[in-house]
Amino acid sequence: MYERILVAVDGSSTSDKALEEAIKLALVHKATLRLVHVVDTAMMDVDNGGLVSVHEVWDALRQGGKTLLKKSEAHVQEADVSVDTVLLETLGVTRVATEIVKAAKEWPADLIVLGTHGRRGFVHLLLGSVAEDVVRMATTPVLLIRGE
């Protein structure tokens, strides 16, 4: 039985599908959802010659994450499911998957739910897969929801 389900959200349609599945599971199991969004500051750790304020970009990413979490939280509450939210950051040294797995351990979650884009070939090589990394690292069961 699942009592605590951690759901990683990123605002994509795939993430939205994963959230819908997590809501269904939460209703069946009377579980609590914890929604997490990871602000990946590692991608911003570059010298841009002062053209863009990195701190302003970080602040915008954080604000976008907070907005996404509030919207997702409201959607879960409409389904009458218990929910809370956590905004995480990579802080330039950790990976998104590492933060998700760490959050699942610390809470502690019974299940991690996240979407997978199913990228292959060069795009997968270039972008990697957060979902794949979570599956490799997690000691908690992981439910992957495939996007379209």
Image (spheres, grey):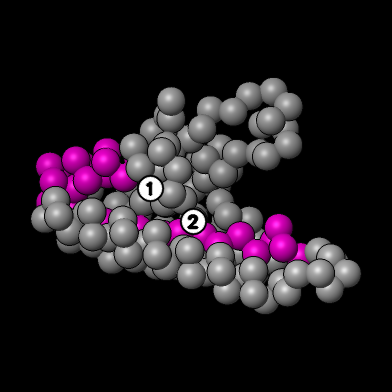
| Quadrant assignment, res 46 | bottom right
Residue at coordinates 40% horizontally, 59% vertically from top-left?
Answer: 68
| Quadrant assignment, res 124 | top right
- Helix, strand or loop for disc 1: strand
Q: Is residue 24 above or below residue 108?
A: above
Residue 37 shown left or right of residue 47 in the figure:
left
- Asked if the magenta segment contains residue 75, the reply would be no
| Quadrant assignment, res 126 | top right
Name which residue type carries label 2: Ile
Q: Which residue is mark 2?
A: 100
Q: Is residue 34 shown to the viewer in this render?
A: no
The disc placed on residue 126 is: none
Q: Which residues are magenta?
A: 18-45
Q: Distance from label 2 to label 1 (Cα)? A: 9 Å
> Does the CB distance between marks 2 and 1 fall below 8 Å?
yes
* Residue 9 locus on image (x, y percent): 41, 51
* Residue 92 locus on image (x, y percent): 70, 66
- Helix, strand or loop for disc 2: helix
- Asked if the magenta segment contains residue 28, the reply would be yes
Of the image marks 2 and 1, the number of the one nearer the N terminus: 2
What is the crowding at mark 2: few (fewer than 14 residues within 10 Å), some, or many (at least 20)? Answer: many
Q: Is residue 96 shown to the viewer in this render?
A: yes
Q: Which residue is mark 1?
A: 112
* Residue 14 locus on image (x, y percent): 42, 37
Residue at coordinates 45% horizontally, 59% vertically from top-left?
Answer: 37
Residue at coordinates 52% horizontally, 69% vertically from top-left?
Answer: 62
Name which residue type carries label 1: Ile
Residue 46 shown left or right of residue 113 in the figure:
right
